[in-house]
Image (cartoon, grey):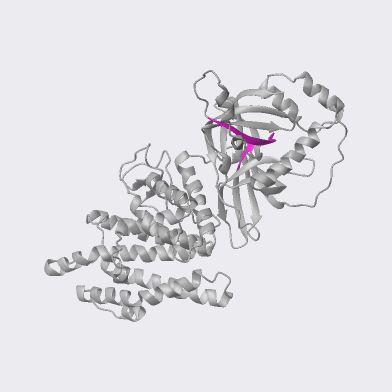
Amino acid sequence: MVNEFLSVGGKPSPDILQALIKIDESVQMGYERIRYQYVSNPRMPKEIEQSLWQDITGLADSMVKAYLRFAKVEADGEEKQAYDAMMPLVLARCLHYVGVLAKWHYFRFDRVPGQLWSQAHSLYRLSEIDGFDCNPFPLYPHHGAEVSSCADEYIQLLMLNTVSSNNLAVRQLDWVDQWLDKWSRNVLIARRYQPDHHHYCVNLSGKQGPEKIGDDSQGDPYRYWGIYELLNEVQGLIARLEAGASPASLGLGNDVRGPACLELLKHLDVFWGMAVRNAQFTRSDRRDVHKEADVVYGLDRLHRKIRADNEKFSRQPDEAKTGVDYDEVMDMRLYGFVSARTRSRQAQAPQIVQRNDPADWQSWRVENESEGGYGATLEAEGAEWVRPGVLVGMRFGPEDSWKVCVVRRISRMNEFQIYAGLQLLSATPVAVNIQTTTVAAAPPRALEVTDFAEFDSTALHSANSALYLPYEIDGVTSNTLLMHSANYDADRTYEVQARDRHFTVNLTRSLDKGVDWTWVTVQVLGQKH
């Protein structure tokens, strides 16, 4: 129907535009069903997937071309008034269809064509010039009271692009797009850059999507926006889901499963939070290399590997040591010297026969490295877990010790391969267990008998895995702990156990966080012998 409409020549008129709007509305119910069929069947045969993809993108492309015929039409008098009344809807629907085209490119891990970005920027710019970019109205009649605007459709398109390379499944990316349909109202586009508020920008004269704000991101063609309000929305939803609310009750979708929804929201919190914290590591001084690396992910898996390293390296006699002695590391951090107790224990320790466990890691091809991290290529199959903010351990051979890294960025090279950029957090980690001890210290006072009678033994929780990482901050090496987020409480003190030694710490400053881990600096209060 739309193609027949496009094939008819003649001069555009308000009546023809009104007919196009009605045609568009008449196909929406069926169009939404076919899109749902695509995203809900990710394992469909290739022939069916190709047919659906062409149907979906074909209609979107046709509608963009049809609406563009009227977007820049020149008219006078009553004809101009008729066009002006319909133009906000025309531009918003056109941006909506550009968003559909971009989304279906993401599903295939394709880049959005530069021409499509140019169209989107031009459409939004037109809405700015005519002064209705933020005017709200229903996009389609069957959406009921739900409203949108040119700015909302544009922001939805831009923000979906920011997560398009995050290795999300088709269904996950579709959920994010549906959520952004509502969340876009929490984001405002500005012409003037505010360093303390804005995190992304876009060049309206360019042929690319959003980018991080740089020194050269200034001038009239740039638009800026911040995501504080968006992050607050995401964090509020996480809190309510953890408190027992269902995704449907929060407007996240009737077919959205609770655990998967919560995990995806936490991922968005971490990823967009990195833009706020500016946690991206630099790419300077990278050297091309060709290495194979063993990789494990998750704090508990990494804890087991590092504990084995700690035992292996600390139990060898001095002349046979091939790695760092972690007892000595802990002594130097706590006291500034190696204690006599540590030296005595090293001398008396028996040789440990290492057990060869079956491999439980993946193999990645490291292509470049720097002092701060690595760039690696991996197979997409079996790597569904790879996301920005995921904690990984890496080593370059069975004799090497495990290093602690975090995935900072990823990009899908094609259907079969992923490129990952990793930040190196520490090459000398120590596996520890932690226990919460007390709430934040109260002012000193004299103890009474009743204090002991009221002591709650449940205040000491069971031990939990964590990693001690010496880390340089502003030129000074600091004590830090990498712990499960579920164990993090800034108002408590912790007992840290590294084999048979125990010391008490306060958490001081949060450095970073992932979906299930938090990295903090600590202050050592004392040690128990």
At a point 44% along the width and 47% down the height, the residue shown is 235
The image quadrant where one finds the N terminus is bottom left
Q: Which residue is drawn at 64% across and 49% down?
A: 376
Name the foreground residue: 256 vs 25.
256
The picture quadrant where one finds residue 138 is: bottom left
Q: Specify whether residue 371 is in view.
A: no
Image location of residue 257, percent across then percent down: 51, 62
**What x and y, as percent, mark residue 26?**
32, 77
Judge whether residue 203 can be spotted in this image: yes
Horizontal and vertical percent for residue 429? 68, 35
Taking the image as shown, residue 123 lies to the left or right of residue 427, namely: left
Q: Is residue 170 above or below residue 421?
A: below
Magenta stretch: residue 128 in it? no
Q: Is residue 427 left or right of residue 173?
A: right
The magenta region covers: 423-439
Taking depth in this image into account, of 116 and 168 the one nearest to the observer is: 168
Q: In this view, does 413 lie to the left or right of 300?
A: left
Q: Quadrant where the C terminus lies?
A: top right
> Does 26 sit above or below residue 382?
below
Foreground pick, 111 / 200? 200
Residue 344: x %, y % from top left: 82, 22
Q: How many marks?
A: 0
| Residue farthest toward the left in the current orientation of the protein | 77
- The residue that appears at 37% across and 57% down in the rendered structure is 182
Please tell me whether the stretch drawn in magenta is mainly helix, strand or loop. strand
Q: Is residue 430 magenta?
A: yes
